[in-house]
Amino acid sequence: MFTGIITDVGTLKALDQRGDLRARIGCRYDPAGIDLGASIACDGVCLTVVDKGQDDTPWFDVDISGETVSKTNIANWAVGRGVNLERALRVGDELGGHIVSGHVDGVAHVTNVAEDGDSTRVTFEAPGALARFIAPKGSVALNGTSLTVNEVDGASFGINFIPHTKTSTTWGTVKAGDRINLEIDTLARYVARLNEVAA
């Protein structure tokens, strides 16, 4: 489990298509503090650490199945890309965002980016099947970042990114056309399911 509070921005150092895709991600985490088999959310995708080490910077490796590649924006990853990172939640950690599983529900698309005071307002188009789970002032995780929805219009929804978020994550470089990993709020999922069963 995660909170959607990004703790580091890693850099893709290598991509190797084997049976599965192996990615090496440079980070600021101390390799001694990362267990093999640990979960790290990478742009919101819960991935398992299979190797770790330190060259010029610390790094860890993850294997990514074809299924995960097909359901996320990982097909667009390239060496040098920034990646939002979050270590798994530990008992006693502050829950500053919302409960995030790291299981991406679909890929949203950025349709517009506009400056709004010191913030940046970004408009997204969600996949049609997921749009009903997104509500004004509700939570979503986008590329692993816990965010509050401003407004919803059909499958379109808007988010404001404050300066801190833009400098502490990869959101400072967002542009129209970007494909974004979307995880809907767990509570919204269960409420919708309860309504279906009650109907």
Image: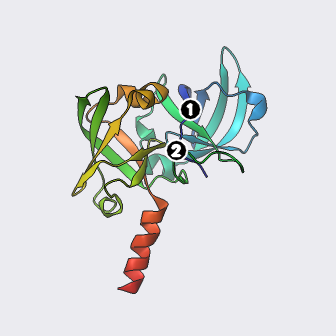
* Mark 1 Cα-neighbour bin, 10 Å: few <14, some 14–19, many ≥20: few
Find residue 165 and report its image quarter: top left
- Which of the pair 116/112 is nearer the observer? 116
- Image position of 145 with respect to 169: above or below: below
Mark 2 secondary-structure assignment: loop
Image mark for residue 4: 2
Judged left or right of residue 180, residue 144 is right
Q: Is residue 52 visible?
A: yes
| Residue at which label 1 appears | 16
45 relative position to 54: left or right: left
- Residue at point 59%, 29% (across, down): 25
Please report the residue visible at 33 percent of the width from the left and 47 percent of the height from the top.
108
Relative height, residue 93 to residue 99 (above, below): above
Where is residue 104? Give x, y as percent. Answer: 47, 52
Between label 1 and label 2, give the one nearer the viewer: 2
Quote the CA–CA distance across marks 1 and 2. Answer: 27 Å
Color scheme of the displayed model? rainbow
The residue lying furthest to the top in this view is: 56
